[in-house]
Structures are given as structure tokens and as C-alpha cells.
């Protein structure tokens, strides 16, 4: 297939590369001239694609995404389709889909998980949209997802993909917080003399083994007691939206809500548990971290990748 990719930062750039390796043609555009872009403008990108066109938007959620989709609505033609792969709120999807539908342009929302590892491991994809548009884009989804049967779901109608990704990130908050609190308790006792090795021992044969645990061990191997990190972790917005949706649907989410509030608490003082959450976000997403005072934290002063207009599109997951 041919695909236009708007946003060539941490996520969009790697996704474009994975698609090309699978044999697809990707025309990339980014505001940065240093991004190895293939088009100099949205108009140029659309002009280089054959109809029916498919354009994947991978820029920060909110106004940047809204402005991009609005501009594409003026440039694309009936039968084309737009995919929003950023971390947009699911209620925005229905607004974007309705505006494009007036011009007979399709819309698909797709939550994407995988962080900086997606290039080699594949991405978890949660899509929302019509059966027709999903079928049109299936070769793209098949190339992006991990090998095998799992990794992609047509979750439902427009908005379902981002709703599913929102819940995914809420669960992620809870799991990360549990590992972080357990690590802090192990660090606090004199009985356990090797916390890193204890975490590493859980990687095989235990019921708490996971990719996040593997990343926690990796972080501890780089900084045994996480002394180089500040106990601060930003929330992405999706944790808030998950709690808001829980209130709207009268569904109790005590663990996810507590994990969200723990991130708020991290802004008030140097929380030891937040050091682990910060370390995990750096490991799976390549997020910049705040260095502890007087410490040279790896990655703390990392500049966003060249052409990284989507660098903040994935502040978690």
C-alpha cells in the first residue's frame, strides 16, 4: 500500500520505517526540515499519494491533531481516509469523523502501544471505524503489529480505538505503580540486601512477570538504586480521561485512580516510588526524565529526535 505519515518523531518515524521494511510505500511529512521527510508540506504529501489515499496522523493530541485533520479535509478527496494514531480523546474522534464525512472522507482512530520498541517488536493496535475503512487499511495494520495472531483489534465504531487505548494506559498506570511501591518497600527494609536481583528473580516462573518488570530490571541494572532520577512522573492525560469515563459509567476504578493520584503526589516531593515510574517511562517510551540534584541522569538532557513533531504524542504507553 501507499500511506502518508504526518509526524516523524519517536513513534511516527519508527512506524514509517517498519512499514517500509514490510514493502509498503510511505510518504512522510514533518514540520522539521531535518526529519528526513519526503514531502515539504501537507499539499505536497497529498499530491504524491495515489487515490484512494490513506494518511496517518501521528502528532500530539489536541489542537495539533485537530488542525492537521482540518487541513487534510480541505486537501483530500471523496474515498480517501484519515487515521488518527495519536493519543486523542475518544470524544474528539466523533467530531473529526463527522466533519470528514461531510466531504465523503473516511476516518479511523487507532490507539498505538509499543513505544520506542515498536520498530523491532511490533505495535499493539486498537482501531475504531467502519468495516470498510478497516478492511482498506488492514495491510498497514498487519505490517505494524507483532508477528502472529495477536496485536490488533477492530475494537468497534469510531472512538472505540482510542477508548480502548485510554483504558490500556489506565491499566498501565496501575501496574507501574504496583511495581514501584513494591520496589520502594524492598529498598526500605534491611532484610533484603539485593533489591535488583530480587526483581530479576521474578522475571521467570512467577505470576507477576511482564515486559514492564523486564524494563524495571533493566532500569535497575543501569542505576542500582535509581539515585540519578528525581521522584517525579508526569501524567499523560489518558489516566485522567480513564477516571472521568469511570465516573460517567459508574464503574469503580480504585487502583487506576490511586495510581493517577500518586503521580500528582510526585509533584509535591521527591517520591521514591516515582523514581521507578520515571525509570519505566524512560525505558519503554524513551521519555526524558528529570535528574536528581547533583546527578547526571542518563537521558535527562536528551533532545527530542530530529523532526519529532510527534515526540509528545506518546507521553506514556
Image (cartoon, grey):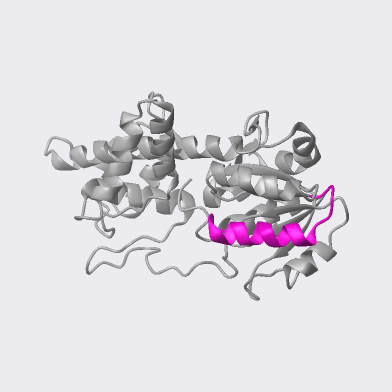
Please name whichever residue, 81 or 136, is drawn nearer the observer in this view of the structure: 81
Rendering coords of residue 291 (x, y %): 30, 64
Q: Is residue 234 left or right of residue 273?
A: right
Q: Is residue 33 left or right of residue 48?
A: left
Please name whichever residue, 121 or 162, is drawn nearer the observer in this view of the structure: 162
Q: Compared to 49, does 83 lie above or below?
A: above
Please name whichever residue, 213 or 74, is drawn nearer the observer in this view of the structure: 74
Rendering coords of residue 114 (x, y %): 55, 45
Residue 10 visible in rendering: yes
Residue lying at the far right in this picture: please name it. 51
| Range drawn in magenta | 59-80
Q: Compared to 203, does 117 lie above or below?
A: below
Q: Is residue 25 left or right of residue 278?
A: right
Residue lying at 71% horizontally and 45% vertically, measured from the top left: 107
Q: Is residue 62 left or right of residue 295?
A: right
Quarter where residue 8 is shown: bottom right
Residue lying at the far bottom in this picture: please name it. 33
Question: Is residue 76 in the magenta section?
Answer: yes
Residue lying at 47% horizontally and 70% vertically, measured from the top left: 303
Q: Compared to 237, does 171 lie above or below?
A: above
Rendering coords of residue 169 (x, y %): 46, 40
Question: Is residue 24 in the magenta section?
Answer: no
Residue lying at 47% horizontally and 35% vertically, measured from the top left: 167
Please name whichever residue, 141 or 214, is drawn nearer the observer in this view of the structure: 141
Residue 203 visible in rendering: no
Residue lying at 62% horizontally and 48% vertically, measured from the top left: 85
Residue lying at the far left in this picture: please name it. 190
How many discs mark residues in the rendered view? 0
Amino acid at each position: 500500500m501507499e500511506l502518508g505519515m504526518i509526524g516523524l518523531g519517536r513513534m511516527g518515524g519508527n512506524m514509517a520505517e517498519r512499514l517500509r521494511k514490510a514493502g509498503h510505500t510511505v510518504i512522510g511529512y514533518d514540520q522539521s526540515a531535518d526529519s528526513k521527510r519526503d514531502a515539504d508540506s501537507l499539499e505536497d504529501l497529498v499530491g504524491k499519494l495515489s487515490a484512494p489515499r490513506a494518511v496517518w496522523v501521528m502528532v500530539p493530541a489536541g489542537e495539533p491533531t485537530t488542525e492537521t485533520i482540518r487541513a487534510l479535509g480541505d486537501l483530500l478527496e471523496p474515498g480517501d481516509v484519515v487515521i488518527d494514531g495519536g493519543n486523542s480523546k475518544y470524544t474528539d474522534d466523533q467530531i473529526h469523523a463527522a466533519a470528514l464525512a461531510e466531504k465523503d472522507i473516511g476516518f479511523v482512530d487507532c490507539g498505538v502501544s509499543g513505544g520506542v520498541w515498536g520498530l523491532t517488536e511490533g505495535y499493539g493496535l486498537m482501531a475504531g471505524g467502519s468495516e470498510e475503512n478497516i478492511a482498506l487499511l488492514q495491510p498497514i495494520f498487519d505490517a505494524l503489529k507483532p508477528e502472529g495472531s495477536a496485536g490488533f483489534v477492530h475494537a468497534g465504531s469510531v472512538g472505540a480505538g482510542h477508548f480502548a487505548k485510554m483504558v490500556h494506559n489506565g491499566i498501565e498506570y496501575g501496574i507501574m505503580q504496583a511495581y514501584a511501591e513494591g520496589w520502594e518497600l524492598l529498598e526500605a527494609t534491611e532484610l533484603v540486601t539485593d533489591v535488583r536481583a530480587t526483581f530479576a528473580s521474578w522475571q521467570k516462573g512467577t505470576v507477576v512477570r511482564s515486559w514492564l518488570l523486564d524494563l524495571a530490571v533493566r532500569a535497575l541494572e543501569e542505576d542500582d538504586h535509581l539515585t540519578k532520577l528525581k521522584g517525579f512522573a508526569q501524567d499523560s492525560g489518558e489516566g485522567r480521561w480513564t477516571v472521568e469515563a469511570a465516573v460517567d459509567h459508574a464503574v469503580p476504578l480504585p487502583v487506576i485512580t490511586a495510581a493517577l493520584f500518586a503521580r500528582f503526589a510526585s509533584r509535591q516531593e521527591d517520591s521514591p516510588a516515582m523514581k521507578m515510574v520515571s525509570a519505566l517511562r524512560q525505558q519503554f517510551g524513551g521519555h526524558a526524565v528529570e535528574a536528581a540534584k547533583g546527578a547526571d541522569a542518563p537521558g535527562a538532557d536528551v533532545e527530542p529526535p530530529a523532526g519529532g513533531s510527534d515526540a509528545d504524542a506518546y507521553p506514556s504507553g
